[in-house]
């Protein structure tokens, strides 16, 4: 949100606690919440890859996504690049879990370290 994003979506299972919490936070902070921007995908690289087709079909698109995990985010970035989108200029993506794959995306993935081992 500090980068000026006001149209923020979510990638992953929609019943996940992160999706629910993000929706509540956006509403609380006065940001628009468009349920079309909350895209249901599997928690995998393939799910992230498939998310771009859904993203491209939207009439009004979010400028940023929070992904349930780094795999979804990495797949999304890969597919966005292949679709000719520039990350982060055209679309920003944030992941969760701070996995090793986060360092291997172009650009490197911004990710939250959820300290899963704790």
Image (tube, grey):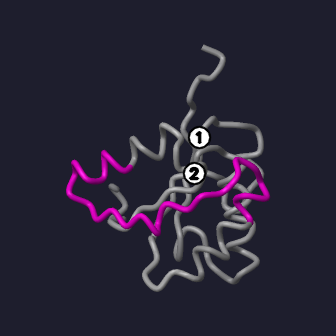
Q: Is residue 39 above or below residue 117?
A: below
Quadrant where the N terminus is found in the figure: bottom left
Which residues, given as a range, are shown in magenta? Answer: 23-49
Q: Is residue 36 left or right of residue 5?
A: right
Q: How far from the left and from the top, in percent, is residue 86? A: 61, 76
The local secondary structure at tag 1 comes to: strand
Vertical order, 77 against 82 (above or below) = above
Residue at screen point 73% across, 58% down: 47
Q: Which residue is mark 2?
A: 67
Q: Is residue 40 magenta?
A: yes
Residue in the foreground of this view, choosing between 30 and 34: 34
Tell me where residue 55 appears, x and y as whole percent: 58, 74
In the figure, residue 85 lies in which quadrant? bottom right
Identified at 77% across, 54% down, the residue is: 45
At a point 63% along the width and 44% down the height, the residue shown is: 69
Would you say 74 lies left or right of 113 here? right
Mark 1 burial class by Cα count in 10 Å: few <14, some 14-19, many 20+? many
Spatial separation of the CA atoms under disc 2 and disc 1: 7 Å
Locate the C terminus by quadrant.
top right
Vertical placement of residue 46 versus 16, above or below = below
Q: Is residue 6 left or right of residue 46?
A: left
In contact (CB < 8 Å): disc 2 and disc 1: yes
Q: Residue at image x 58%, y 45%?
A: 68
Q: Position of residue 66 (x, y in %)?
A: 51, 53
Per the image, label 2 sits on a secondary structure element best described as strand
Residues 92 and 71: in front is: 71
Give how far across and how far down residue 39 sits, in percent.
55, 62
How busy is the neighbourhood of tag 2: few (under 14 within 10 Å), some, or many (20 plus)? many
- Which of pointers 2 and 1 lies earlier in the amino acid sequence? 2
Instruction: Out of 1 and 72, give the one closest to the viewer.
Output: 72
Location of mark 1 (residue)? 96
Is 63 displayed left or right of 31 in the figure?
A: right
């Amino acid at each position: 949100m500090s980068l000026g994003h006001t149209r923020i979506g979510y990638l992953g299972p929609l019943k996940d606690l992160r999706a629910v919490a993000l929706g509540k936070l956006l509403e609380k902070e006065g940001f628009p919440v468009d349920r079309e921007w909350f895209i249901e995908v599997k928690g995998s690289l393939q799910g992230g890859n498939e998310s771009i087709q859904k993203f491209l079909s939207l009439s009004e698109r979010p400028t940023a996504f929070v992904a349930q995990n780094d795999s979804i985010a990495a797949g999304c970035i890969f597919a966005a690049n292949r679709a000719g989108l520039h990350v982060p200029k055209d679309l920003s993506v944030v992941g969760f879990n701070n996995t090793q794959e986060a360092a291997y995306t172009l650009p490197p993935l911004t990710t939250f370290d959820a300290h899963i081992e704790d």
